[in-house]
Image (cartoon, rainbow, N blue to C red):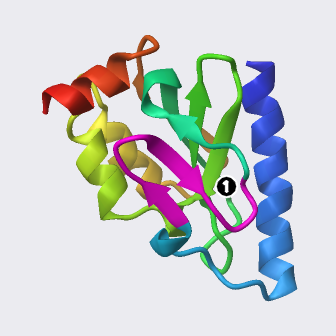
Amino acid sequence: MVYVVGMFLVLVCLGAFWAHSGARRWTPSLVQIDGQGIRPGGGCNEAISWPDLVQIDIMTTDQGPFADDVFWLFTARDGKGCALPGSAVGDALFARLAKLPGVDFGAVVSAMGSVENASFRVWSGQPGDAWAAAEAG
């Protein structure tokens, strides 16, 4: 829980920075999603491999629409993770999500409609679940 609250505060600060800095928005081309995992570019150094992925959340802020206000949080078994702004997420991630058992697409829809500071659990599993689902599908 402390990790989620800490990440939320970082994301709020990041959103404020993006809103006031004139920085360009992320695009899906800055994120590599393939059979190995998620390897973000553009400032996020934490890669998450599918065998290590245990949780996916979406956090929203009240900072939109002129700043990124949707962030995807990917958490690995060791508690480390990566946060990506919603503008960096594309078709490759959704194709991968479709293979995971128990993905809550209702949470994704709710998050996309949120204009408040909130957190939405999209998926959680055991180490190896995301890898096994991708290999099976």
The x and y percentages for residue 132 are 27, 21
Compared to residue 102, the image places residue 108 above or below, namely below
Label 1: which secondary element: loop
Could you tell me which quadrant the N terminus lies in?
top right
- Of all residues shown, which one is farthest toward the bottom? 22
> Magenta span has 35?
yes
**Identity of the residue drawn at 59% across and 29% down:** 75
Q: Quadrant of residue 6?
A: top right
The x and y percentages for residue 113 are 43, 57
**How many labels, in total?**
1
Q: On the picture, is 3 further left or further right than 103? A: right
Residue 100 seen in render: no
Which sits in the foreground, 2 or 46? 46
> Magenta span has 40?
yes
The three-letter code of the residue at mark 1 reads Thr
**Identity of the residue drawn at 31% across and 32% down:** 104
Compared to residue 102, the image places residue 20 above or below, namely below
The x and y percentages for residue 19 are 78, 78
**Identity of the residue drawn at 46% across and 70% down:** 28
**Identity of the residue drawn at 67% across and 55% down:** 61
Which sits in the foreground, 79 or 56? 79
Residue 61 seen in render: yes
The x and y percentages for residue 68 are 64, 68
Task: Quickly name the residue at label 1.
Answer: 61
| Magenta stretch bounds | 31-44
